[in-house]
Each structure stands twice: as C-alpha cells, then as structure tokens.
Amino acid sequence: MGLRQWAVAGLREQWQSSHALLLLPVALIVAIMIVDIHSPESIHLGPALVIAPALTSSFAGPRLSGLVGALAVLAQIVIAILHGGLGTTNHIVQILTLFVLSVMIVVYCAIRDRHREQLAQVRSVAEAAQHVLLWPLPEHIGPLRVACLYLAAEDEAQIGGDLYAATRADSRVRVLIGDVRGKGLSAIGEAALLLGAFREAGHRQSSLPDLAATLEQSVTRYLADFEPPEEMGERFATALLMEIPDGDPITRMTSCGHPPPLLLSPGHVVTVPSVHPAPPMGIGSAHPGDYHLDVFSFEPGDTLLLYTDGVIEARDAAGRFYPLADRVAQWTEENPETLLHRIRRDLLAHTGGRLDDDAALIALHRTPSVHHGRPHQRIIHADGFRHRPQNQPQGG
C-alpha cells in the first residue's frame, strides 16, 4: 500500500471512530446549555462550553473540531438569549472569547495534522531505506529453513547497529551476523559498510578466514577515512561468519569477537565451546592466518540460533541478564518462526517491553535430506560438544 493510500485509509478509519466519540462533546454542550438556562442569572456556566471543542481535538481533525466549536458558540448565543439577554456585556464577552478559543483549537488541529503527515512521510522513507540496507532473509536457502528477528532499541527505528545477511556460494550457504559498537541510527553507517562488503565478497572468497580478512580491510579503510579523531580506536564491530555446506552435516565458523551460537537438537540444547575468536573488526589484523576456522556438527533436524549481545545482555528490573540458553531449552522442537516468536515475547517480558541495546537473532533449521558421498555421522572437532545443564553458566 502506497503512502497516499495508507493516509486515505487512516483518515477513513479516523473519521469512523470520531463519529462515535463525537457524541460526548455534543452531549456536554447540550447538558451545559440546559443547566445554565435553568440556573440563576448570577451563575454563568457558558465558559465551560470550551471543553467540547478542546475534547474533540483530542480524537478528531480540524473540521470536526470546528464544527463542535461552532455548536458551542451557538449554544452560548442561545444561553445569552434565554438567560439575561444577548446584548449584555457579559454574554458578548463570553461569545467572543468562546469563538476565539474555538478558532485557536482548529488552527492547532490543522498544524498537528500537518506534522503527522510529514512524520508519516519521513517514516515511510526511513522504512524504505532500512529495508534496502537490511534485506529480509529468505525463508528457505539451500538446505536451511530460515527465520530472523530484529529489535531496535531506538524509538521509530527498525534497525540499528546489529546486522545479518546470507548468501549462496556454490553448494554452500554463508551467513553473517554482527554487532557494530553503538546502537540505533548512529551505528547504521558501519553496519551498511559491513553488509555491503559481505554481499560483495561472500561468494568470492574461498574460505571464511579469507572472507574475514577482506571484511576487516573494508572496515579499516572506512574507519581511516571517516572515524572522528576523538573516537580513534573506539569504533569496531563483532562478527560471526558461518558456512553450511549442502552435502555435509557440518558447519564451519569464524568468529571475530562475537558470541557463539547455540545448537538446538530435539530434546536438548548444545553450546559450541570450541570457538577461537579473533579480535573484533576494526581493531584486529587483516591477515587470513589470524582467523581460526572452527568446524562442528550440524545434523538434519538441528537448529542453529545466532544472536547478538543485545539479547544475552538484556536486563530485567533487578538487573539480571536474559538467560537465553535456559529459555530456548524448552523450545527445541519448534520451527524457526515459532522459536523466534517465543523468544521475542519472552525477551520483551523480561525487560519490561523495552531494550537498552539493539538485538538480532537468526534461526537456521537444517531440513532432513539425503547425503551422498561420506557416511552420515556426527562430526566433532576440537573440544567437541558439551551438553550444558540449564543451571550451569555458558562457557566462553
């Protein structure tokens, strides 16, 4: 729906709801007029009529507010005729005052509605720009069923410093999730740079360490040109690069200071302890040899949950961090969309409905498939897998 159609639909809905609410100010005008007419001449309730147009302006536009204002002035004239005479100084002053206040209310409504239209246009442009920057991930890519979730900490923003992307490279899927230092709209510049570099190099580099080095070079060049002198060395981005081949039940991973993913198998949660993170991008080295490639099993039916630190560092009113691994342990049987829906509701309930930092999650579910070539087996590298009890802190 375009902006014009959206505005027309909004005005139509506002008009319909305003008609029902219009009964209240009209009833107030009638009640005040009747009481004033039957009161002693020393009592004047006419000034209270200004409540009607003021109340109307809270739910209606300038036309309805002006209409109610005109009814209030007409009621004041009727009061003057039946309660002391229209030519009395007191009634003339009351009529003029009510008229001026009603005009001021109508002008206020017109200015407010104009600002609303401008804000709607700005939001529409911002939403389009943010969708161009952070493309929605496909529901299916390669052997994976995918769902993603983004919760921006800054009001009226849909994205901020967290980022994610996915691409196909031959017979494999490559995924990026990252977190630029800072939050909200101020961190979008670095996020856009990292996303653009990944989309350009993600399908060209032969290995994840090579890809990480290429992204590091892009970030370093950007910071050298645009980083303010007072923030020298303070801008960086954590990133997690993952590569999931179509034909092997494994996942390759290179971490640049980013939290490790969670592996969800039916009935239990497995963390990935054998992670050897390099420094975050922007403060590290651009040599491929400085990045470690971790390999671990990713069987059909398993789900990988990638996230940014805005999730695990979210606090409740008592200052307790959100226990992501403990919470998702009860949802290992869910599909990616339902899993992220449950996490979103639970996370916002934990924080009281507002996050202090941007948060992003990606759920990658490996669909069952037939593998040819090597036998189907669980592959364990480095320290292997360690099943983490729910009451045990997450390892680093």
Image: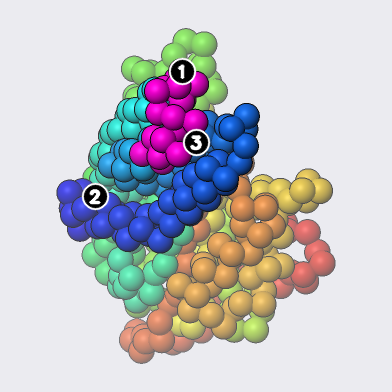
206 relative to 190, above or below: below
Residue 228 position in % (x across, y down): 44, 14
- Magenta stretch, residue numbers: 74-94
Overall secondary structure of the magenta stretch? helix
Assess disc 3: are there few (<14), some (14-19) or many (≥20) residues with their C-alpha within 10 Å of its C-alpha. many
* Residue picked out by circle 1: 89
Q: Residue at x 30, y 33 (%)?
A: 110
Residue 114 position in % (x across, y down): 28, 33
Tell me the CA gap for discs 3 and 2: 46 Å
Three-letter amino acid code at disc 1? Thr
Assess disc 2: are there few (<14), some (14-19) or many (≥20) residues with their C-alpha within 10 Å of its C-alpha. some
Tell me the CA gap for discs 2 and 1: 46 Å
Three-letter amino acid code at disc 3? His
* Residue picked out by circle 2: 7
Quadrant where the N terminus is found in the figure:
bottom left
Which tag, 1 or 3, sits closer to the chain's start? 3
- Using the image, tell me which numbered label, if any, was put on residue 83: 3
Choose top left, top right, bottom left or bottom right for residue 330.
bottom right
Which tag, 2 or 1, sits closer to the chain's start? 2
Q: Residue at x 43, y 77 (%)?
A: 366
Q: 179 or 241: which is nearer to us?
A: 179
